[in-house]
Amino acid sequence: MTDLRETPLAARHRALGASFTDFGGWSMPVRYTSDLAEHHAVRSAAGLFDISHMAEFLVTGQEAGTYLDFALAGSISGMKIGKAKYSLLLSDAGGILDDVIVYRLGDERFLVISNAGNREIVAEALAERTTRAGIPAAFTADAEDEVDVFAPGHPSNGAVISDVSDRFALIAVQGPHAREILAATDGVEGLTPRLEELGYYAWSGGTYAGRSLFVARTGYTGEDGFELLVPNALAGPLWDALLAAGSEHGLVPAGLAARDTLRLEAGMPLHGHELSADILPAQAGLGRVVALGKGAFVGKAALESVVAVDAPVLVGLVADGRRAGRAGYAVLDADGIPVGGVTSGALSPTLGHPIAMAFVPPALAEPGTALAIDVRGTRIPATVTALPFYRRTA
Amino acid sequence: MTDLNSLKYTDEHEWIALDGDVATIGITDYAADKLGDVVYVDLPAVGSTVTAGDVCGEIESTKSVGELYAPLTGEVVEVNDDVVADPSLVNADAFAGWLVKLRVEPADVDGLLDRAAYVALTGGEE
């Protein structure tokens, strides 16, 4: 219970009656009222999430793209300004140290957002990779007091990587009403491009209360929505303004419990569950994220040499009834022999039946394959299904 | 109205209301809040016998699984089919969301916690 970090919004969560949980070293709201109600609100209207625990890194300089091409699995230097890209930080062995989203802010400027619990691992890896990228590169563990996400960094003919996590809060507005809510939020000004022109996996820049506001049309719920990066000091006022604007659009604050069932329905992996340093991208269905055709990058040699045809692969499982398989439960084949394990599972609030993600042998990964989950001694029949479990219609 | 002071409790966050030799058992609001939204309950069969301290059922929320411990030894005389059909009753109303009724030895309830002891256990919440 000691040394848990709090976000700049902690007092607001307490005032809203939230229950808290330890997540990645942070005390985070797990629910405010009912996790099911919060889940349904995001599917039908909108939810407001504090995700300030997530880690942010700025990468700037003439060779910023070159550096990220080396440090990450995807082709980053080829990204268009204004776009976002899902990518992976691999180990030399090709395992997944973390999954990240990269935003191209400018020719020589990128924002990388990683998971809270992996901040130290990501920071260490990004620092270590400055010495191997073949360009002049430097890592600064803590940014200066004031960081403007859009202001030019220190001019560099190489790459400078700054951990700016402690400077910024991140707030997500997710759900079919997210855009109208953000458009109606007091103090949000000058977004370019305008929200109605902002594509999915793209970002827009503007101001909130006169300070730089970064708005990305990304999320972790399977709904349309936005993630807003602001300096810590503005997190509270922005949270309040969003809640006020959302009051007539069904917006509710939503906690990590709802966030987890939402991302699970959307088939989105969570590092520490579906992804880990022991899992290769192809096992998790993320082979497309790896740009083997680009130049050298960390993990490339291993991925080119490993032939793991029998390695377990990630699948979706659906079952009848209400008893959900949960992380760590065994997956059984038709004969009741353990063949794999559940990484995440829940009774799907949207679908009304149990869903799970699990690793199973490739021979049992075909949709339609009949398996079972050992739910505390009871064999619950489960069928392999294509991910995601839920896809929004609009 | 249920008089909370007439109830007994366990450190597994169950409440027990004794009427004659029939004990009605549910989980406390405190426990329901900690669990989150209850989505599934598994209760013992009517006619079966449960033993104090043993697991006799399960309560699952979206996020976790809680075991239901028999607070007393006795025969299951009734289970709450309403709560099986609609587990959210456990969150909505701890008393409407009762789980099982046991025929017990009335004197056995003396070994359970009284309300003051339970409230002390939870740090003032119930």
Image (spheres, rainbow, N blue to C red):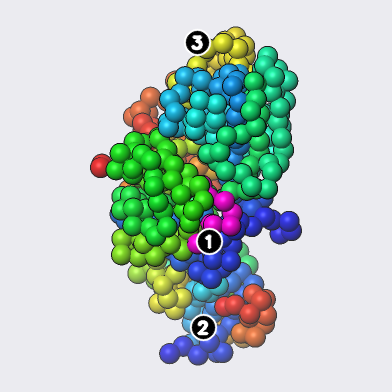
Identify which amino acid the numbered label 1 is placed on: Gly
Residue A105 at what x, y percent from top left? 49, 33
Identify which amino acid the numbered label 3 is placed on: Gly
Name the disc covering residue B17, or none: 2
Could you say whether the residue bearing mark 2 is in a helix, strand or loop? Answer: strand
Name the disc covering residue A293, or none: 3
Q: Magenta span has A229?
A: yes
Same chain check for tags 2 and 1: no
Disc 1 residue crowd, few under 14, some 14–19, many 20+, Cα 10 Å? some
Distance from disc 2 to disc 3, alpha carbons, whole Å, reads: 70 Å
Q: Are marks 1 and 3 in contact (CB under 8 Å)?
A: no
Say which of marks 2 and 1 sits in front: 1
Q: Main secondary structure of the magenta part?
A: helix
Q: Where, by quadrant of the figure, is residue A66 drawn?
A: top right
Please name the residue shown 57% across and 34% down the image. A152
Q: Magenta span has A244?
A: no
Task: Write the start and end of the magenta stretch as one range.
Answer: A228-237
Please name the residue shown 50% across and 16% down the image. A291
Residue A178 at what x, y percent from top left? 35, 51
Q: Are marks 2 and 3 in contact (CB under 8 Å)?
A: no
Distance from disc 1 to disc 3, alpha carbons, whole Å, reads: 44 Å
